[in-house]
Image (cartoon, rainbow, N blue to C red):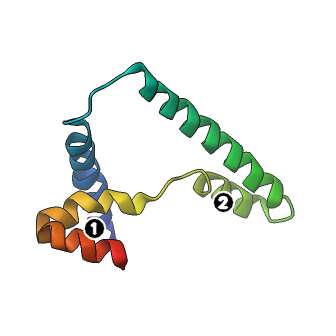
Amino acid sequence: MGEAIARVVFNLTLPCLIIVTFSDVEFSNSLLYLIVIAFVYGLGIGLLGLILLKRDSRYDRGMFGMMIPGLNIGLFAYPLVEGLWGLRGIKVFWYV
């Protein structure tokens, strides 16, 4: 059951989120700064996490080193929640 939900989230929700998000965006050169900022943030917070976890086992350092730079994956659920329950569902989802 968990694998099926994961497949729906990553194979349906993520592409829908990308399509909905980028359908109304006007691209400009200043948006490239967001890519650079996100990349630097990911590297910086990943390295900081590895330094802070240097006393843990190699397995734990590797697992946390991959998880720490990741942003909130829960945002991928927004298009699915909106499709099922509309804006009211988004409001409830936001406060939970």
Q: Nearer the viewer, residue 1 or 48?
A: 48
Q: Nearer the viewer, residue 20 or 88?
A: 88
**Which label is found at residue 5?**
1
SS for tag 2?
A: helix
- Residue shown at the point (36%, 80%) measured from the top left: 96
Q: Nearer the viewer, residue 86 or 46?
A: 86
Compared to 47, does 13 lie above or below?
below
**Which label is found at residue 61?**
none
Q: Is residue 69 left or right of residue 61?
A: left
- Residue shown at the point (54%, 52%) measured from the top left: 70
- Residue shown at the point (50%, 32%) measured from the top left: 35
Q: Quadrant of residue 31?
A: top left
User: Which image quarter holds the N terminus?
Assistant: bottom left
Mark 2, residue position: 64
> How many numbered discs sit on the rendered protein?
2
Say few, some or many: other residues with alpha carbon within 10 Å of mark 1 (under 14 / 14 to 19 / 20 or more).
few
Cα separation between marks 2 and 1: 23 Å
Say few, some or many: other residues with alpha carbon within 10 Å of mark 2 (under 14 / 14 to 19 / 20 or more).
some
User: Residue 3 in the image: x percent, y percent?
Assistant: 32, 67
User: Residue 83 in the image: x percent, y percent?
Assistant: 13, 62
Compared to 6, does 20 lie above or below?
above
Q: Nearer the viewer, residue 28 or 67?
A: 28
Direction right: furthest residue: 55
**Amino acid type, callout 2:** Phe
Q: Quadrant of residue 2?
A: bottom left
Compared to 7, does 39 lie above or below?
above
